[in-house]
Image (cartoon, rainbow, N blue to C red):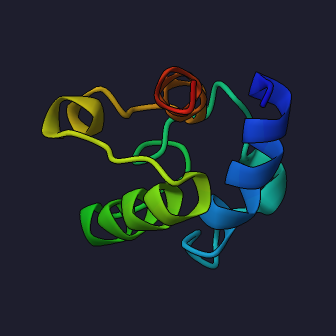
Amino acid sequence: MTPDSIYKTLKPIIEQYLPEDVSVDEISPEADLTGELNINSAHLVDIVLDVEDAFDIELTNDDMENLRTVQDAVDIIWKKAD
């Protein structure tokens, strides 16, 4: 699994939780999940659960605290999926 393949799997997961006023085109590695993408905390938990299922990993509280950008998510998944 490469970081690029992780991103390609992660993007549709995030897309499900975007508010109507945020475009899918705004999902980039640098995008801030709660800031730029306006994902609320409840949906962030949903994303974490979906990520755990999709990648067969378990995220800790520390992982979730470090989850700010899409790239943070890719990096965390990359480390956990090894």
Give the residue at x 58% y 35%: 70
Within the image, what quadrant is residue 49 found in? bottom left
- Quadrant of the rendering where the N terminus is positioned: top right
Depth order, front residue of 72/54? 54
- In the rendered image, the vertical position of residue 67 relative to residue 54, given as above or below: above
Give the residue at x 84% y 51%: 25
Q: Position of residue 31 (x, y in %)?
A: 61, 34
Q: Position of residue 37 (x, y in %)?
A: 55, 52
Q: Position of residue 54 (x, y in %)?
A: 60, 61
Q: Position of residue 29 (x, y in %)?
A: 69, 29
- Quadrant of the rendering where the C terminus is positioned: top right
Within the image, what quadrant is residue 14 found in? bottom right
Depth order, front residue of 21/59? 59
Q: Is residue 52 left or right of residue 61?
A: right
Within the image, what quadrant is residue 5 found in? top right
Depth order, front residue of 51/69? 51
Give the residue at x 44% y 47%: 57
Question: Given the current orientation, which residue lies at the most extreme left position?
Answer: 61
Depth order, front residue of 24/57? 57
Q: Is residue 74 left or right of residue 43?
A: right
Give the residue at x 21% y 39%: 60
